[in-house]
Image (cartoon, helix red, strand yellow):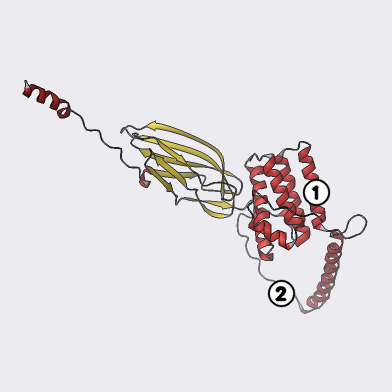
Amino acid sequence: MRMALVCGAMLPGMFAIPVAEAEPLQASDITVSAEPDSLFAGERLHYMIVVHHDGRQPVRVGGLEVGPDKPFELAGRSESSAKLPDGSMELRVTTDLAAFGIGRQRLPGFTVSAGRDTRFTFHPTVAVVVASMTDSTMTRLRPAAPPVGPGFLPWLLLLPAVGVIGLLVFAIVHLLRMTLLKDSRGAFFDPSRVARQKLRSLDRQLSRGLAPAEAYETLSNILREFLQHRFRFRAMEQVTQEIAEELESREVKARDLVLKLLLRADFIKFADGLPDMAECRSSLKIAEAFCYGTPDQLDAISGADDSTPSSVTQG
């Protein structure tokens, strides 16, 4: 009887099937791709993330490194999971990203978690090329024309003509520069004051029901007009990247803040962004501080976080 009891206790252990542990997730199990691999600033690309795993633990992809301070902004996301013929699982995450900046941009990193114990950040090496929105109509090299040397007499006539034309051009440019900063009464106007008046008018339109997306487009035009008159370059005709180069060459204070506002307006216009009213009013305060602030106030807003713009004392 004693032997029977011992054998009965040992039988469950003898026939127990060992349970295999889940294989740890590794970086080699993750693949990424992007389509297209080159695009203009403001356009969208499809960013695909594929994770292969054994299916014994739930796998999640999150923490995508996108946002206003990054070269990419999230415009849409979907994910699906499927079982492969070999019995393993495949998690497929598809995102739509709006690309900004110029040049080669590495795809954004993300966080992968499997169960409770495995969690790591994956940084892809794949990159896409973002080109300027300024198009070029030149598609081929033109043949060089053979040089033609003018005679002695034409040179004598040409030099005085060039001098006269140069004087006329100088006079016209001088008159234009003198009249561009005059109002209808002939008095010089202050670009900062004009920008502040337009920003306050835009704030009142928001209170009357103007959509924040439309307000961002008007805000972009106000900032470009202010930059054109204040620093004398064609900001109304340039893309944001060209404006960034102009401001950097002039060492303009707090230029990073106004560039972030212009990039935000570009994203809303070209990538169908949906700003809220609080974000729009915060951007108006930053723009007013940039256009009408004192040097100390410009230093203050440069060191402050964009979500809480510094207040500007009105004179």
Q: Is residue 192 above or below residue 84?
A: below
Residue drawn at x 68%, y 51% as measured from the top left: 309
Instruction: Report whether 280 appears left or right of 85.
Output: right
**Residue 57 in view:** yes
Q: Residues within 10 Å of mark 1 (few under 14, many from 20)?
A: some
- What element does badge 1 sit on? helix
Q: Quadrant of the C terminus?
A: bottom right
Q: Nearer the viewer, mark 1 or mark 2?
A: 1
Expressed as whole percent of the image width and height from the top left, the position of residue 222 reads 76, 50
Q: Give the camera-side residue of 147 and 237.
A: 237
Mark 2 residue type: Gly
Seen at 60% across and 49% down, the residue is 41
Label 1, label 2: how many angstroms apart (C-alpha)? 56 Å
**Residue 155: image location, x then y, percent:** 78, 77
Query: What kind of residue is marked 1?
Result: Lys
Around disc 2, counting alpha carbons within 10 Å, would you say few (fewer than 14), some (14 to 19), or many (20 or more)? few
Q: Which residue is mark 2?
A: 149
Label 2's element? loop
Q: Quadrant of residue 162?
A: bottom right
* Residue topped by disc 1: 198
Residue 181, image x and y in percent? 85, 59
Q: Which callout, 1 or 2, points at the residue further toward the start of the chain?
A: 2
Q: Quadrant of residue 25?
A: top left
Q: Residue 223 in the image: x percent, y percent?
A: 74, 52
